[in-house]
Structures are given as C-alpha cells and as structure tokens.
Image: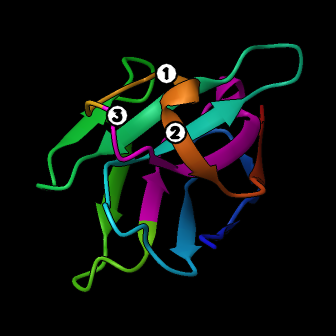
Amino acid sequence: QVRLVEYGGGTVQAGGSLRLSCAPSEYPVRRNCMGWFRQAPGKEGEVVTIIDRAGRTYYSDSVTGRFTISQDSAKRTLYLQMNSLKPEDTAMYYCAIAHAWTYCPSARVQEYQYWGQGTQVTVSS
C-alpha cells in the first residue's frame, strides 16, 4: 500500500520561505508523475506544480518563479521549495502520485491516485 507523508509546513511571514517534503512509503509498480496540490478554505483544490518521470517540471502561473519542485538523487523524496511566500499561498498542501494511466502532466485532481494527509502552510501579512 502506497502511503505519502508530507512535512515541513508551518507559519511564516510574507516574503519568507518554507520547504515541504513528501516521502512515499513505496512507489507504485508503474510509477507516474507526481505533483503538489493545495486547497485553501472555501476554495477548490488546485495544482501547484508537477514533475514527470523524465524530471520535467510544470508550474501554475501563480507560483512560477517562486516555487521549485525537485526530487533527491535517488528519487525517493519529493520536495517543494517555496520562496517569496504570499498570504494567498496559505493552504493545505498535498503531494500526490498520478494513476498509471494518467497522461502527464495533468492538473486534474481525479487523475491522481495516491495522496498524503497534507501539511498546513500559513503565510501572515
């Protein structure tokens, strides 16, 4: 059973930085792209960034230039480096692994099979 655990969230002032980590217990046999999503109170979940199996990265317009997705050399842990944080970045952040059949990159929540429990990021003004 694949389990994802995110950590690294917290409260930071606007302009600050945080680094989120996502450590899967194991990877699916047919490993596919991974992504970070977020959901703010009263809003729908949205994709933040995706990394595919070849290491290509994709970012939402709202975080381009500020956030960076990466994996360690063994591709065991997924990271999200968040710089120049803004109050509108406040949300619960989730990492996810896409279904084996998903055509990556995909911003559709339903095309991701495995999800972590989330880690809260709060940015104060």
Q: Residue at x 56, y 45 (%)?
A: 113
Q: Pointer 2 and pointer 3: residues touching (CB < 8 Å)? A: yes
| Residue 122 in picture, x, y percent from top left | 79, 43
Q: Which residue is mark 3?
A: 102
Is residue 94 depicted above or below 85 in this figure? below
Q: Which residue is mark 2?
A: 112
The residues bearing labels 1 and 2 have C-alpha atoms spaced at a distance of 7 Å
Callout 1 amino acid: Arg
Residue 85 appears in the figure: no
Closer to the N terminus: mark 3 or mark 1? 3
The residues bearing labels 3 and 1 have C-alpha atoms spaced at a distance of 10 Å
Q: Residue at x 54, y 74 (%)?
A: 24
Residue 9 appears in the figure: yes
The magenta span reads 79-102
Disc sitting over residue 70 in the figure = none
Residue 14 in the figure: left or right of residue 101: right
Residue 3 in the figure: left or right of residue 69: right
Is residue 7 depicted above or below 114 in this figure? below
Residue 79 in the figure: left or right of residue 40: left
| Residue 45 in picture, x, y percent from top left | 67, 23
Residue 110 in the figure: left or right of residue 70: right
| Residue 90 in picture, x, y percent from top left | 74, 34
Which of the pair 113/65 is nearer the observer? 113
Closer to the N terminus: mark 2 or mark 3? 3
SS for callout 3:
loop
Is residue 84 depicted above or below 21 in this figure? above
Q: Which residue is mark 1?
A: 108
| Residue 99 in picture, x, y percent from top left | 44, 43
Which of the pair 114/15 is nearer the observer? 114
